[in-house]
Image (spheres, rainbow, N blue to C red):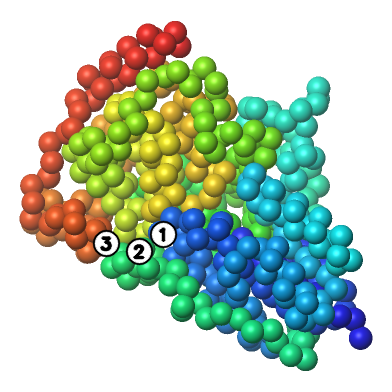
Amino acid sequence: MTNPTILWLRRDLRLSDHAALSAAVARGGPVIPVFIRDDSVDSLGAAPKWRLGLSLADFSRRLEEKGSRLILRSGDALTVLQALVAETGAGAVYWLRLYDPDAIERDSAVKSALRDAGIDAQSHAGHVLFEPWTVETKTGGFYRVYTPMWRAVRDRDVPGTLAAPGELRAPADWPAGEDLVDWRMGRAMNRGAQVCLPYQRVGEEAAQGRLGWFMGHGVADYDTARDLPGEDGTSGLSENLSLGEISPRQCWHAGQRALQDGAGGAETWLKELVWREFAYHLMYHTPRILTRNWREEWEAFGWNTDEDRADVVAWKQGRTGEPFVDAAMREMYVTGKMHNRARMIVASYLTKHLLTHWKIGMHWFEECLTDWDPASNAMGWQWSAGSGPDATPYFRIFNPETQVEKFDPKGVYRRRWIAEGRANPSETALSYFAAVPRSWGLAPDHPYPAPVVDLKQGRARALSAYEARGF
C-alpha cells in the first residue's frame, strides 16, 4: 500500500482545479489535508484573518463530505510537517506555490529539509495563471508596464482546469488536530464580525455560483458597470481568489467562453485578471514593492507618516467631509470590501490631498479588507500614490467631487453608506455605526463633518510638493 501524502494547504481552499490535490490523489495512497497556523497566519489583519477562519470552516465541511477531514496544527511550518511525517508515515508532502518573499523563503527551506530526509516534497502551480518566471519581454526580464504584458499573454494557451476528486482516501488513523474555534480567528473583529458576515461569499460553492451568475448576467455590461459603485457590476470574486476558493484558471476560461459568445465586457474582465497577474509578477521580481517605494526617486519625498494626525484619523473613520471618500470607507467597514473605483478615490485622496504615505493606507486596508491580497494591495496603493510601476502620473489627482458626479450622479452609493443628515437613512448606512469601534464615539444623529481639506488647496499643495522634489 502506498504511504500517505500530506496536502499542505495555504491560500488554496478548494477541491477543483487543485494541482497539488490531484497529484496527491494520483499518487495512490491516503491523503491528509493539513493547514498550519504559523507566523504568516498570526500576523494577518483583523478582517482577513476572520475571513480565512470562515473559509477554513467551510473547506473542512466539504472535506468531511468526501470522507476526509482537515487537520489543523499551530507552529513553525517545517517543524509541524516533520512531526506529521513521523506520526503518519507519510512519504510525500505536496502544496501550491505562493510568491511573496516570506513564503518563498519558508517553502524553499521546507522543500530542502524534507527532500534531504527522503520525503517527496513537491510544489505546484495554481495561485496565478502564469508563473512569474515564464513571462518575459522580448529582450529578457519581467514586464514593468501592464499593457505590453497583457499583449504578451492574452493569446497564450492556458491549460484546462482539473476536476475535483471523486473521493479522498483516508488514512487508517488520523493524526490529532486542533479545534478551529480555539484559534479565535475573528477575535480582533469584535462586534464588526456579525455586521460583516452577511456580505461574505464563503467557499468554493459560493464562488462558483457567483462566477456563473456573473457570466450569465454581469459580464456583458462590465465595461461600464464596473465603474459604478452603486451597481452590482463586478464579479465580486476578489475574496475567493485571494483565498484560492476559486482558481484564476477557472475564471480565465469562463471569461474566454463569454468572449467567444460575444459578451461585450469579457475582454475587459480578462484584462483585470491579468492586472492581478501583473501585481504578482512584480511582487515576485521586485519584492520591495511590499515595503518601499517601487520608484526609488520617491524615497526622499516628504510624505506625512503620522497616522494619528487628525485628517488621517478622519480618513480612517470615513469622516473626511468628502461623501465619495467617506462612503467608500464605510462600505469597507460594513462589507469587508470596497468597490475598485472607490479604492482609487480614497487612495488618491490620502496620498495626494492629504500627502500621507501610501504605507499607512496599505496597512489600514490590510487590517480591514476581507479580500486582502498582498500583491494587489501593495501595487494598488503605489499605483495611486504615483510611486509604483506603471503608476498614475503624480499630477493626476482624482477630484472626489467630479468623480462622484461622473460615477454616482444619482447619489445611490452615497445614500447607501452615509446616514448623517438624512431623515430616513438606509439600513446599510446605519450598519456602519454598529461595525466600527465603540471608542470612536460615533452616532448617526451626529452632524456630517465639514471637509478636512479644501480640494483645490489640497491639489495645489500636492503639486507644489511634487514640483519641489523635481517630479
Residue type marked 3: Ala
Q: Is residue 413 left or right of residue 338?
A: left
Q: Are marks 2 and 1 in contact (CB under 8 Å)?
A: yes
**Local crowd at mark 2 within 10 Å, few (<14), some, or many (≥20)?**
many
* x and y, in percent, of residue 223 in the image: 51, 42
- Dot 1: element: helix
Marks 1 and 3, the one that precedes in the sequence: 1
In the image, 420 versus 213, the foreground residue is 420
Q: Are marks 1 and 3 in contact (CB under 8 Å)?
A: no
The residue positioned 49% from the left and 70% from the top of the image is 53
Residue occupied by mark 3 = 435
* x and y, in percent, of residue 230 in the image: 34, 50
Q: Is residue 322 visible?
A: no
Residue type marked 1: Ala
Q: Are marks 3 and 2 in contact (CB under 8 Å)?
A: no
The residue positioned 52% from the left and 17% from the top of the image is 297
Q: Quadrant of the C terminus?
A: top left
Residue type marked 2: Met
The residue positioned 74% from the left and 63% from the top of the image is 95
Vertical comparison of 236 with 361: above or below:
below
Residue occupied by mark 2 = 189
**Local crowd at mark 1 within 10 Å, few (<14), some, or many (≥20)?**
many
Residue occupied by mark 1 = 47
Q: Which mark is residue 276?
A: none
